[in-house]
Image (tube, rainbow, N blue to C red):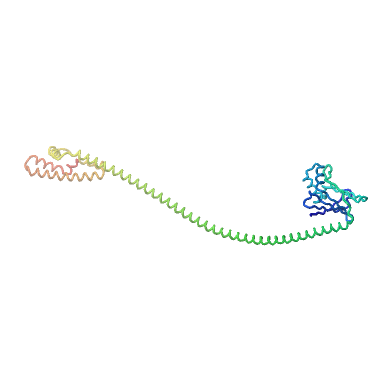
Amino acid sequence: MEKTLIRIHPVSDPEAEYFLQVSWEKDISSGFGIILTDGEYAWTGTVSEAEISREAADMEMNREKYVEELKKALIFGEESAGKYNFTVSVDEENAQCHFSYERNLKDGSFRLGSLKLQKVSHPADVVKELIGYCLDCLGGLQVKNEHLQKENERLFCDLSDVEKRLEKCVEAKEELEADLYNRFVLVLNEKKTKIRNLQKLLNEAKELAVDTQCTRDSIATTQMATEKEDDYDGSTEEESENLIQSSLPSAPERRDSLLGSPDVISTAPRRKRRQRTMNPAGTEAKIATYETEMLAKEKTDLSSQKTAGKHSPDVMSLETLENTCEPEDLFDDI
């Protein structure tokens, strides 16, 4: 059986003090017993489950809600908050006590319940019972308090151990962070150095590629210029040779011209100067070689003619021609 003990002050006599004990088996909704005493007299009574249902129906209130109101009024003792009022009326003739309890509202109050309590013939036994109950509750509270104190001490010890472990963890964490930071700095510096070296190699490779490209471009430009010069020189030499061959007469015609025209004024020096200014160096060398060959052939022809007819007028005119013109002057026309 469960019990609870509260102290109440009736509305009719606020100076008076009563002790109210409520007991029940399983739940207060199944019925409960009441003992009321002022220390000198005692009254007792019971409330059945049917009476609880009847009171809830009379107030048109849900039964569960009504039971909750009973718990707040009789068990939790919320009269100190002014929410509930108690009324005690003693009838000495009938040895009864009329006890009622109400719920305060803003505009008024409504009665939760009332019952008639019977006077106890031996109130000292009731007072002893209440004192025993109070002592039992006090003992239980002391045991509970001791248990809570031990639990609190254990929790404090655990808290101290946790704090120490936490401090060690914090120190280990700081050491680990410092170590990792140092390692990270080393790795970062190595990576920076490697990146710098790679950038340096990349720049050198770029410069080398640029230099190589410039060299290739210059070589290609030089080759193109050389090929153009070679093409120009070859075309010039071919044109010069064709011009020389077309302008030169054949050997018999040249011999007849020389023999038949002894008084022709030579214009070789002027043509020689013109050729020197017009022809390039390679063409002059080829012309000189060609003149030497032709001179040798002319000498051979002249020797054969001298042998064939020594006293002919042609020989005399050839001798006169030889005395007036040198071979070089004759072949300057070339």
Which is more toward the observer, 199 or 17?
17
Asked whether, in this view, residue 275 is left or right of residue 5, the answer is left
Kindly identify the residue that appears in the image at 12 percent across and 45 percent down. Answer: 300
Task: Give residue 54's position: percent from left, percent from top.
Answer: 82, 44
Which is more toward the observer, 133 or 254?
133
Task: Give residue 297's position: percent from left, percent from top.
Answer: 14, 44
Kindly identify the residue that appears in the image at 11 percent across and 41 percent down. Answer: 318
Decide if residue 187 is in sight here.
Answer: yes
Kindly identify the residue that appears in the image at 80 percent across and 59 percent down. Answer: 136
Task: Give residue 280's position: percent from left, percent from top.
Answer: 26, 43
Q: Quadrant of the C terminus?
A: top left
Q: Which of the 4 quarters of the picture holds residue 164?
A: bottom right
Depicted 33 relative to depicted 238: above or below: below
Asked whether, in this view, residue 16 is left or right of residue 316, the answer is right
Q: Which of the 4 quarters of the picture holds residue 290?
A: top left
Which is more toward the observer, 106 or 11?
11
Decide if residue 274 is in sight here.
Answer: no
Kindly identify the residue that appears in the image at 74 percent across and 60 percent down. Answer: 147
